[in-house]
Amino acid sequence: MEKIVKYITEICNEKKAIDPILININEFSSFAENILIISANNRQMTFLADEIVKGTRKDFGIEPLCAEGKAASGWILVDYGHFVINIMTPECREYYNLEKLWSEGKIIKLESK
């Protein structure tokens, strides 16, 4: 998992995503161990999701269970089962405030350049 998160963080940095964080929810969630939350503008969102899916397929041999949402909605979710990636516009991220919703989890701010 650590290698995948590092890989996704590198993609986020390359594509100029904003403020990626990882929240470990393993202790109180039955559906996932970790949630990644990434902010991006509408133009970046689809490209970022596609790059993550292509990269994890190629370099780790894993496929998402599902991917939902569109850039126009402000939120794209890519579900790998044990971890879920939320790519959101800054406005959507502020509105839904997933960090607060999952505040019992261990929040790890990922390096962004």
Image (cartoon, grey):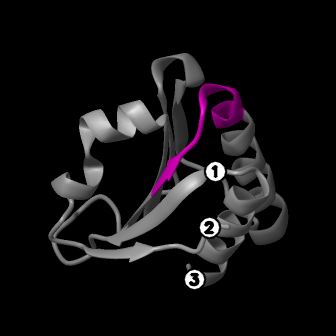
Q: Amino acid at mark 3?
A: Glu
Marks 3/1: CA distance?
19 Å
Residue at 49% across, 34% down: 89
Q: Please, what secondary structure does the residue beneath circle 3 have?
A: helix
Marks 3/2: CA distance?
16 Å
Picture layout, residue 31 above or below residue 43: below
Between disc 3 and disc 1, the foreground one is 1
Mark 2 highlights which residue?
112
Mark 3 highlights which residue?
2
- Residue 28 falls in image quadrant: bottom left
- Residue 26 falls in image quadrant: bottom left
- For the residue pair 52 and 89, the one nearer the viewer reads as 89
Q: Amino acid at mark 2?
A: Ser
Sooner in the amino-acid sequence: mark 3 or mark 1: 3
Residue 58 placement (x, y as % from top left):
84, 61
Q: Are marks 3 and 1 in contact (CB under 8 Å)?
A: no
- For the residue pair 61 and 103, the one nearer the viewer reads as 103
Residue at 71% across, 52% down: 52
Residue 18 placement (x, y as % from top left):
56, 52
Sooner in the amino-acid sequence: mark 3 or mark 2: 3
Mark 1 highlights which residue?
17
Of all residues, the one furthest to the right in this rendering is: 58
Residue 113 placement (x, y as % from top left):
68, 67
Of all residues, the one furthest to the front in this rendering is: 113
Residues drawn in magenta: 37-46
Q: Are marks 1 and 2 in contact (CB under 8 Å)?
A: yes
Q: Please, what secondary structure does the residue beneath circle 1 have?
A: loop
